[in-house]
Image (spheres, rainbow, N blue to C red):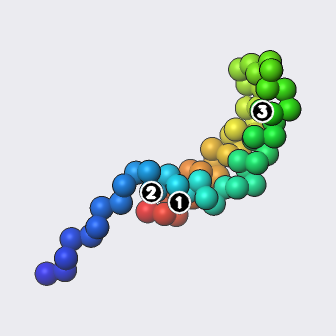
Amino acid sequence: MPPPAKPTRPIQKFAAAVSQCGAEASIYGKCILADYNSVHKNQCAQEFMLLKECYLKAAKRAK
């Protein structure tokens, strides 16, 4: 009988997925910093969605 698999902590999965999305995170961060004194809803929605999609794809590959 094989030994049980070592459980992966959710934060480890998150860190592994986020590490795959450096370019998208940089673009989103630059968008927020461009006008950080007056951040408002949906200001960087397009950039955020690109980051989210990258993260979701990376998280699926990590399973």
Please give left or right for residue 60 compared with residue 41 in the image. Answer: left
Give the image quarter of residue 27. Answer: top right
Q: What residue did someone put label 3 on?
A: 32
Q: Are marks 1 and 2 in contact (CB under 8 Å)?
A: yes
Q: How many marks?
A: 3
Residue type at mark 2 is Gln
Q: Quadrant of residue 36?
A: top right
Of 39 and 46, nearer the camera is 39
Residue type pointed to by label 3: Ile
Where does label 1 land, which residue?
16
Q: Which residue is mark 2?
A: 12
Give the quarter of the figure containing the N terminus.
bottom left
In the figure, is residue 52 to the left or right of 39? left
Asked which secondary structure carries label 3, the reply is helix
Give, as a three-letter code, the residue at label 1: Ala
Q: Residue at x 50, y 52 (%)?
A: 14
Disc 3/disc 2 C-alpha distance (Å): 26 Å
Judge by depth and name the residue closer to the eye, 12 or 44. Answer: 12
- Tell me if residue 12 comes above or below residue 43 in the rendering: below
Kindly state the secondary structure of the residue where label 2 is placed: helix
The residues bearing labels 1 and 2 have C-alpha atoms spaced at a distance of 6 Å
Going from N to C along the chain, the mark reached first, 1 or 3, is 1
Secondary structure beneath disc 1?
Answer: helix
Q: Residue furthest bottom?
A: 1
Residue in view at x 30 percent, y 61 percent: 7
Crowding at dot 3, Cα within 10 Å, few <14 / some 14-19 / many 20+, comes out as some
Where residue 2 sits, quadrant-wise, is bottom left
